[in-house]
Amino acid sequence: MSNKSVAVGVTLAGVMAHCGGSPAGAVRFLVGAVASAPDAPEPYAALAELWRDRRSELEEDVRRDSSLSAVVAQAYFFFLDGEMDDAVMALGSATGARPDVAWGAAPWFGDAQLLGAVRAEAMAEACLRTLDYGHDLDSDAMRERFTPWFRAIDVVSARSPVPESLASMARLPRACGRYDLAFAVCDRALEPAMWTEVARAATWRVMGRLDQAATAFERALALEPDNWSVHLDLADVRAEQGDFAGAAAQAEQGLAHAPGEASLRAAAAAYRTRRSGSSDDLRALIALAPQVPSPGYRALLIDHACAAEGLPRELVAEARRATRQA
């Protein structure tokens, strides 16, 4: 066997399944063995045997159990049943919860049958699930662990270049600092698309290349001029560039398409405040702050606004309180 931990896990799983009468307990031992050596074939062989011999019991256990070990096992069971979309998405969920384990190194995840059958939409969703917990993935160790994911993204994006799916898939390599792959995935779109332009812009923005990010957002708006979210993204980039007049103007353009969007209204008020030092605009931002869903974005807008010159101290203090109270 691949290593001592794997051997112990497989042995204990056999005892639990056949002597202890607990296939669920056996699964936990086997997933523990997988975690110690994700590329080892022996735990998967034992899981396949359990699925074949004790399926009715395991189906009920897996349905009731939301633990990480159950999700990892279920991903493989989906694969055994030919449910490739569900297999990939379940593995994405497990990877998002514990990215410190190279779950993607599982032999079945690189299987040609899986990579040839999984839909681009499912691979895209799986990539998004790997990011659900907000772990920092931009390190050499993480890039090594995610190498099987990069390979899968490369294969699936080449086979099925659906723009929205490409944009979602590109988020994972971008989070890992694999900007080259993020761009390459977007480049596979067969024609210009808003989704891939936004993904390119986001990658340029993470890299600190704000001029290129703004240009990509402009291309996205040329393709979908009524998309308020892209107007907001471009307004935020203008603010990062220090162009608060341009940021305010861009947010106002977005409001022409979505006058009720709270984040857009708050951004417009914040950037007007920073541009002109208007107390009335800061009061408008304070009133809108509780409606901005992202606490981080709300705080950023208030920081921008409060940096304007000439604002009354009492009003700035009120705005700071709005950051904490909203």
Image (tube, helix red, strand yellow):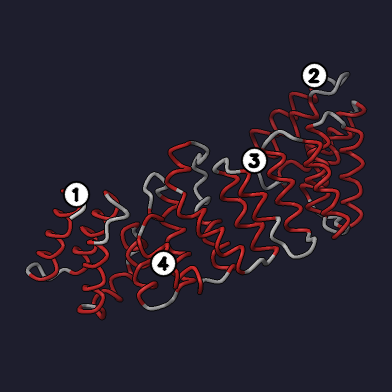
- Identify which amino acid the numbered label 4 is placed on: Asp
Q: Quadrant of residue 31?
A: bottom left
| Vertical side of 301 occupied by 111: above or below | below
- Identify which amino acid the numbered label 3 is placed on: Pro
Closest to the camera, between mark 3 and mark 4, is 4
Q: Which residue is mark 1?
A: 3
Q: Earlier in the sequence, mark 3 or mark 4?
A: 4
Q: Earlier in the sequence, mark 2 or mark 1?
A: 1
- Identify which amino acid the numbered label 1 is placed on: Asn
Q: Earlier in the sequence, mark 2 or mark 4?
A: 4
Secondary structure at badge 1 equals loop
Q: Earlier in the sequence, mark 3 or mark 2?
A: 3
Write the residue at 45% across / 54% down: 148
Separation of disc 1 and disc 4 at Cα?
23 Å
Quarter of the image where the N terminus is located? bottom left
Q: Which residue is mark 2?
A: 313
Write the residue at 86% across / 19% down: 309
Separation of disc 3 and disc 2 at Cα?
23 Å
Q: Which residue is mark 3?
A: 295
Q: Looking at the picture, how far across and down is residue 68, in whole percent?
A: 35, 57
- Identify which amino acid the numbered label 2 is placed on: Arg
Secondary structure at badge 4 equals loop
